[in-house]
Amino acid sequence: MLVSSRGFHAPKRGNVESEYEDAYFPERNYRHANLAEFRCAVADGASESAFSREWARLLVRRYHYKQISLKLLQRCWQRKVTREPVPWYLEEKIRRGAHATLMGLSLHDPDPASGAGGTWTATAVGDSCLFHVRDDQLLAVAPLTHSAQFNNHPHLVSTDGSRGFGLQPSHIKEASGHWQTNDIFYLLTDALAEWALSAQEAGRPPWSQFRRLGRFGRTQQAGQRAFNKLVNKLRLFGGLHNDDTTLLRIEVA
């Protein structure tokens, strides 16, 4: 199995890079062959909680490395945010914990005896979404399937283990399917996911726009500039909400 991935991101309009609270992994352009399994993830840190950027980054990295022990992650976050003194107004926020959505995708190598493509599984908490696309046709979307399902209160993974260990099991949604050579998967945080579903429902699927981002030059900087231009245009004229915006593009062969 040959997998390539490219990630793109943009903070809220008016914010600087350090205020971006989404996360994705792998972060850099990635291309590897002969893989039996590939794992990637995006997360959206909740802005109202303290150090949600750090929590989102922990979640996506540990999902990639198959180290998704929630209790361990909660301890890692606690050590990180209490390593140095913080202003008094952050102390109560730290006690309440950080929160984030999570969308993780795992791709599995095909069985050589079958002659068919491989399989994929997805695990989600909240409203970051996965889109499975073939020849610019949408095959599957999860966990939300319609733009009207988005709201301001998605389910979240929490650093607060006092209730439900930081996560209610019923909030975990799973999906699975089969991939073929040259299929593309997009992992999007909520603002772009809602916009993409709205565009699909209106008969203006965005997949060719997203696909071109992955072909835009050889450098990560060139692709990122193209993404920034697209996001700015959509925020001004396309109805994209002004929120941290993340797209992780995965192509499998």
Image (spheres, grey):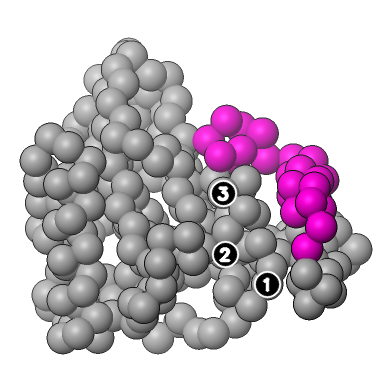
Residue bearing the label numbered 3: 57
Query: Element at badge 3?
Result: helix
Amino acid type assigned to the residue bearing label 3 in the image:
Arg
| x 12%, y 60%: residue | 209
Query: Is 204 on the left or on the right of 187, as rendered?
Result: left
Position above or below: 97 against 92: above
Label 3 neighbour load within 10 Å: few <14, some 14-19, many 20+: many
Q: Quadrant of the N terminus?
A: top left
Residues at discs 1 and 3 in contact (Cβ within 8 Å): no
Residues at discs 2 and 3 in contact (Cβ within 8 Å): no
Query: Is 45 on the left or on the right of 183, as rendered?
Result: right
Q: Position of residue 26 (x, y in %)?
A: 42, 38
The boundaries of the magenta stretch are 61-86
Q: Measure the C-alpha gap from mark 1 to mark 2.
A: 8 Å
Position above or below: 167 against 195: above
Q: Measure the C-alpha gap from mark 2 to mark 3.
A: 9 Å
* Label annotation for residue 49: 1
Q: Nearer the viewer, residue 121 or 189?
A: 189
Amino acid type assigned to the residue bearing label 2 in the image:
Gly
| x 23%, y 70%: residue | 231
